Amino acid sequence: NAGVMQNPRHLVRRRGQEARLRCSPMKGHSHVYWYRQLPEEGLKFMVYLQKENIIDESGMPKERFSAEFPKEGPSILRIQQVVRGDSAAYFCASSPRLAGAVYNEQFFGPGTRLTVL
Amino acid sequence: AQSVTQPDIHITVSEGASLELRCNYSYGATPYLFWYVQSPGQGLQLLLKYFSGDTLVQGIKGFEAEFKRSQSSFNLRKPSVHWSDAAEYFCAVGHGSSNTGKLIFGQGTTLQVKP
């Protein structure tokens, strides 16, 4: 059973370009979380999605950032008009969201390291 | 507001010595607590978790952690550190399934191991 997959692993963009980060959850997982890790900091929650729905986007910057998790295909985190401050590692985690479980464990992907020149 | 504090940013221990990494949390309800390890350039690996029950939990790689509600702490311990344990360690608290389940992370502790 493959783990959470993220691509690309490394992404370089110039200021003003768009960045698209992809996350394929583990098989059977229908819930995806995105986290951002700025240099020398811990991970910060960005957004939580289920298939075709955004459940919690309280951690997403108000502008330039968007996320989706379509019925088919990977989850996408999109950053428009990137700035140097967007340089970070972006991690995706997936969860099975089992009914009745007190907590559904999240399994993390290897991350995408975005560098904005 | 919920928060997690890891007071030690960097810790250096000698190989074979014991280790304790501190974690304090602020959370109104029953916390779901986690320790993750991150090797350079890698993703996060779950070391152990606490949901309920026995307050001393065992994890992988010989790690354990103790939940102390009175101190709002969940410190990670290992009796004898190996050079391969050098990494960054994150404590996290999770919202329960009645909420979104998102994790709140501490800022991390970088562990260096001296030969």
Image (cartoon, rainbow, N blue to C red):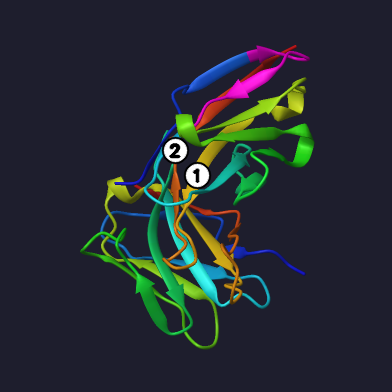
- Residue B98 x %, y %: 45, 68
Residue at the spot of label 2: B106
Asked if the stretch drawn in magenta spans residue B104, the answer is no
Q: Chain of mark 1?
A: B
Q: Earlier in the sequence, mark 2 or mark 1?
A: 1
The span shown in magenta is: B13-23
Q: Viewer-proximal residue, A91 or A32?
A: A32
Q: Provide the secondary structure element on which disc 2 rests.
A: loop
In the rendered view, does B94 fall on the left or right side of B67? left
- At x 78%, y 15%, the residue is B16
* Disc 2 and disc 1 on one polypeptide chain: yes
Q: Position of residue A18 (x, y in %)?
A: 33, 65
Residue farthest along the bottom direction in this orientation? A71
Q: Quadrant of residue B14?
A: top right
Mark 2 neighbour density, 10 Å: few (under 14) some (14–19) many (20 or more): many
CA gap, disc 2 to disc 1? 6 Å
Which three-letter amino acid code belongs to the residue tagged 2? Gly
Residue that appears at 62% across and 39% down: B37
Chain assignment, label 2: B
Q: Are marks 2 and 1 in contact (CB under 8 Å)?
A: yes
Circle 1 — which element?
Answer: strand
Q: Residue at x 60, y 40 (%)?
A: B38
- Label 1, on which residue? B92
Most distant residue in the left direction? A63
Amino acid type assigned to the residue bearing label 1 in the image: Ala
